[in-house]
Image (cartoon, rainbow, N blue to C red):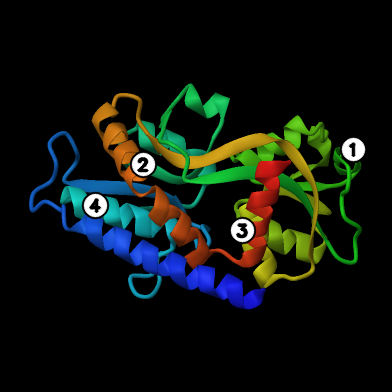
Amino acid sequence: MRGVTVGIRVAALALAAGTVASAETAATAASSPGLPATLRVLVAADEMPEVFSFEERGRPGLERELLEGFCRIHGLKMQVVPVRDFDQIIPMLLRGEGDLITGIVDTPARRQKVAFSSEILPVRHLAVTRRPGPAASRVEDLRGLRVGVIPGTSWEQATADAGVPKAKRVPFRDAGALLEGLRTGQADAAVMPLLDYALASKRDPELVPGVFVGSHLSGALAVRPEDGRLLEALNGYLQGMRQARHALMFKYLSEEALSLIALARRD
C-alpha cells in the first residue's frame, strides 16, 4: 500500500510540474492591465515554510509557489511583506500597505471588510493538547482548560465560539509562542486549523489532536473590496490551476495532513 502512495505522490508532482510549465508558456512580458506592477503580499511572519517560505532559495511553500506562478503569468513582480502581529494584517491591507493577504481563513466577520478568493485549502479547527495531558475529546472539555489564543485570528474566534470563558483564554503573540506555551505549561490547549496542527506535530510529536471545533471554512487569499480586477484574475488563475493545486498539496503536506483534510471534509 505504501508503494501505491509513493506512486501517487510521484505522479502528482509530475502533474504539478507539467501544469505549471504549461501555464507559464502564457506569461506576458508586461504586467496585465488593471493589476499592480508589483504585487505586495502580506504574510504572517510565523507562517510555516511548507505553506509560505520566506527563504529565497529552496522550496517556496504551497501558497508562495502558487503566487509566484500567478505573478509570472501576469508579468508581475512579487514583494513579500512579513506581518508580525496578525491582528494588524487586515488593517494593513485596507491602508494600502499591501495588495493581498495570504494564509487567511475566510469568515463571515472578515468578509464584511475584505474580498476573498476561491478556496485554496479547506479549513477545519480542532482542539489540541500536549502529552502528558489528555486529549480534549469534547468541546465541553475546553471550557475548563487554559486555552492559548492569538488575537485577531480564527484560532481566537473558534475558541470563543466553543464557549471558552474569556478568563480562560491565554493570549500569545504568534503561533510559535503559543506552541511554546503548550510545551512549557503556560496553556493547556489550543484551537487551531488542522493543517497547522499537522505541520506543528512534525516538530513536536507530543501534541495530541482532539475534537473538531466549529464548521467547515476555507483558507483563501484576501484583497480590498475595490480591487475587483485583481480578485477576478486570482480566481481565474486558481480555477485553471485546480489540478496543480491538488498536486502541490501532495508535494508540501504530510500524509497525516492530507488524511486529516480528507477526514474533515467527510465529518
Q: Secondary structure at mark 3?
A: helix
Residue corresponding to mark 3: 258
Residue 176 position in % (x across, y down): 62, 61
Which of disc 2 and disc 4 is earlier in sequence?
4
> Could you tell me how far apart the alpha carbons at marks 2 and 3 are, in whole angstroms?
21 Å
| The quarter of the displayed image where residue 16 is located | bottom left
| The quarter of the displayed image where residue 256 is located | bottom right
Residue located 45% across and 60% down the image:
247
The answer to whether one can see residue 49 in this image is: no
Which of disc 4 and disc 3 is earlier in sequence?
4
Residue corresponding to mark 1: 140
Which of disc 4 and disc 1 is earlier in sequence?
4
Give the amino acid type for the residue marked by disc 3 in the picture. Answer: Leu
Which is closer to the viewer, label 4 or label 2? 2
Residue located 90% across and 37% down the image:
140
Give the amino acid type for the residue marked by disc 1 in the picture. Answer: Glu
Q: Residues within 10 Å of mark 3 (few under 14, many from 20)?
A: some
Which is closer to the viewer, label 3 or label 4? 3
175 lies left or right of 62: right
